[in-house]
Amino acid sequence: MSIYDTEGQDFSRRLVLLGGLQGGLFLVLAGRLQFLQVARSDVYATLAEANRVNISQISAVRGRITDRFGELLAGNDRNLQIRMVPERVANMDATLNDLTRLLKLSRSELHDIRSKIRRQPSFKPIVILEDLSWDEFARLNLNLPYLSGVEPLVGQKRIYPHAQSVAHLVGFVGTKTREDLQRVDDIVGDYVGRSGIERDFERDLRGTPGVRHVEVNAIGRTVRELQSEPGEKGRDLALSIDLDLQNFAAQRLNGHSGSAMVMDIHNGEMVAMVSSPSFDLNKLSRGIEVEEWERLIDHERKPLVNKAMRGLYAPGSTFKMLVALAALEEKLIDPEEKISCSGVYKFAREEFHCWAADGHGPVNMVDALERSCDTYFYDLALRVGIDRIEAMAQRFGFGKLTGINLDGEKSGTVPGRDWKRANYDTGWRTGETIITAIGQGYLLATPLQLAVMTAALANGGKLVKPRITKAGDAVEPVAVLGLKPENMAVVQRGMYRSVNRPDGTAYASSLLIDGARMSGKTGTVQVRRISKDERLNGVIPNSKLDWHLRDHSLFVGYVPHNNPRFAVSVVIEHGGGGAQVAAPIARDIMVQLMNNKAITKAPKLVMQDKPGMNS
Amino acid sequence: MSYQSRSGRMGQLVSIGTLNMPMISMTLILGLIGVMVLYSVAGGDFSPWAWRHATRLALGLILMYVIANLDLRTIFNFAYPIYAGIFILLIAVEIFGDTGMGAQRWLDLGFVTLQPSEFMRFALIMALARYYHTLHRDDVSRPTGLLAPIALIGLPALLVFAQPDLGTALMLAISGLGVVFLAGVSMRFFIAGIALAIAAVPVVWNYLFEYQKERVLVFLDPERDPLGAGYHIIQSKIGIGSGGFFGKGLAQGTQSQLKFLPERHTDFVFAIYAEELGFVGSLLLIFLFAVLIFLMFNIASQMRHRFSQLTISGFAFALSIYVIVNLAMVMGLAPVVGVPLPFISYGGTSLLAFMVGLGIILAMERQPMADLPK
């Protein structure tokens, strides 16, 4: 028994030792448990929540874009789509075969679908087809039980009822790219503005996206929706455009390369703003083929460019009003003083030609504007000098952005001594002052700047900020140029006569509606150098020249002559003479405008004669 | 025949009331907790796991009772043959076994698939107990007396390690060494052994499979592969930690219900339990295991036969090692080594093996005075 006892004691000792070790380890486990579940519980609870909840955005319905009267320019339409979650498709080949049969897919469509599927992780839903017809959609729904992993979806797409005429203003949308996505977002078929209003007003139009909290499992599959906050619809945006006038202007510019616009001279609203040729917004929003895109980019007449604010042209004779004002404000000439025009003006050893080869004879300032006599302004240029011309051009907004609420406008060039020094590193030559006075040479302006200039000439010297959206009550502040009314009257008289007198360059484009007439000024801009030989043998008419060598045709004007309300600016690239092409277009647009029920009813347009204006 | 005094006439079944009820109750409670957790893991469904776990538990209880009826001498006599038989099964697994979870562990007998390694643990403990029962006390700490235990432990451990199943092999070895320790082998052998083991680490490291190395590396730094091997540990810790003090409630564990936790019905079942029943429930479970192990040690200390002492305390030690290693692994304190939580984890062999072990303890406790050969 003694052996048993010692053995027993020894065993008990070992048992206690081992039991103690185990007890210690159990305490360690309990301590760890306390650490995880009590001390650090918050941290892990947060991690578990993050594991569980997947937050995704629900895109809001995009705001509509309308014209000033509520006509739809950009809206949303139902987009019947087919979405697929590849990993839930039992047999991909069989499913695609079924879809091909059901929807009569072409080989290339099928190829596109396959590559879409390959590009995405298989648990992510992808839109494989969109823009289905109801028929196709119904057929698919009927067969849905046999198509695992395929689901029908009613999404949204952007539509443009007037895809061509407002293309440059409204702009188009595109599907989100990787760069657009700041975080993981599984909303499919969502889009962002790529150009024009759609891009510039993206924030307003997009609205506030909703947030959806969904419970997901370890592989990202949605188990159930926890909560969702619906998004806020994007804000509707009313443009200042009158769609009827816009469409008319677009129609009128058809076949030309250029732009036309009508602007409210008081509040800067663009009532029409057309650039031609145009493109199809609907096509660009859906995504176009690379070749078609390249065709648009490389096209000689630049259909994608909004020429109204991105086209730069020498203003030509439309600039003469500013030269006249520069002279009058400084009292450098009596407006009644006559300067004789022989058709050629000699300065230094150079000859400067008037557009009328035989000359205009003696003309005063109003005559010179009416008949667009170059010689008068050559002479005036020497009296005024480039510095004053430069200053006046700048006062009228040349050389800087007009500030229209559309991105991408250009500022143009106002040449001067400093400018010449900075850009050409040579001094200013007086001959350059002479050609600047007739709006040629280095001077470059956008048609929009010409419209702003014309508005200022018409409204008594207030520089307004043009805008593409309706002004409402808050009219942008304007800069008052502080020009003398009597000087403005001289220029206005010249513009009136230019359109309404038989000798006026734009007489063929005069109009009379309810006693209201149009005032304006033509411009013809040479884009080539006319040689001495050509002068002798007769200048080659535009119709015989290659398109890109023809003159630019310009016209600026306003209506009504006696109580101005709207300014017009038309620039036709290589259109020929201002009087032959641009002026008739401007006239037609103005006639359309003045016959417009809604616009003429607006209180501002009061037809009444001001004494002294018609003389 | 003193054992008859408690078991009645030979050939008659023992009355259940004469068995150790506290230990049976603890086993039953733990098994039922397993059923409950598996019910919860399935999202509040008895299928696919809870129902079968309950069936196995019932089967295990019957098996336990049947084994409790065995004559201690029979058990004693069969200690070596059983060890030999299971050793042969291990070799059979090595040759014919199915590969499950990247390791050969299963033997498909046609009607049931078995993991012989789970049973080997108990066979090894009994074989060692049998060996020390007859070994003279003076020989216990002699080098010659150590040769047989080393062979008994080493051979099956190497086989299991080759399957490859590092976790089970280590558990097997540690369980066996526990018996050797309890048998009273001089401490210096253990100290020397530990020193040798540490020295052997770099050598063993080279023989590890890539996934085993990866598990150890990931244990040291789970963030090293958060979506791969480290995923288990990270997600498991999130599950336990997010349970908080009172837990999220049964079947409310987001970690488990949303399937963030892999192996959540087997090795990682405690993470779910802790997530859903919180700190309170987890402590309770650890306490229940501690009580069961204490009960077993207590029974062992009352035994007079060396065979019974060593077998029962060896079983208790093996159970505690399983619980400790599993919990440590799930809580991120030990590498992921594929060790189930006894009675709770889904898995037939593990459950049945433990219940067979408990049946043997019951049989031993019933026959403290049995006449065993010396």
Image (spheres, grey):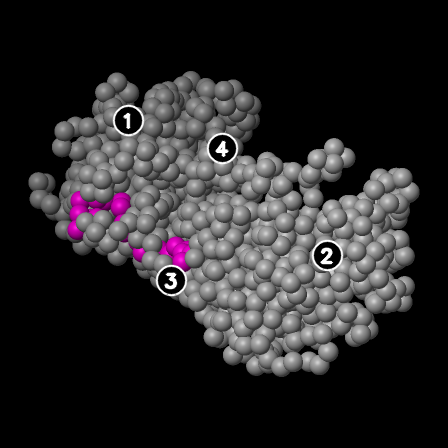
Q: CA distance from mark 1 to mark 3?
A: 41 Å
Dot 1 and dot 2 residues touching (CB under 8 Å): no
Please tell me whether residue A462 is drawn above or below residue A439 in the rendered image.
Answer: below
Mark 1 or 2: the one toward you: 2
Counting from the top left corner in percent of width and height, residue B253 is at: 37, 56
Q: Is residue A345 left or right of residue B331?
A: right
Counting from the top left corner in percent of width and height, residue B281 is at: 39, 59
Can the viewer see residue A148 in this picture?
Answer: yes
The answer to whether tags 2 and 3 share a subunit is yes
Please tell me whether residue B94 is drawn above or below residue A159 in the rendered image.
Answer: above
Give the numbered dot on residue B216.
Answer: 4
Q: Amino acid at mark 3?
A: Leu
Q: CA distance from mark 2 to mark 4?
A: 93 Å
Q: Name the residue carrying label 3.
A: A226
- Mark 1, Cα crowd under 10 Å, few <14 / some 14-19 / many 20+, is some
Considering the numbered disc 4 on the image, is that residue within a helix, a strand or a loop? Answer: helix
Q: Name the residue carrying label 2.
A: A372
- Mark 3, Cα crowd under 10 Å, few <14 / some 14-19 / many 20+, is few
Picture quarter with the N terminus of chain A = top left
In the image, the segment drawn in magenta is: A140-161
Mark 2 or 4: the one toward you: 2
Q: Name the residue carrying label 1.
A: B99
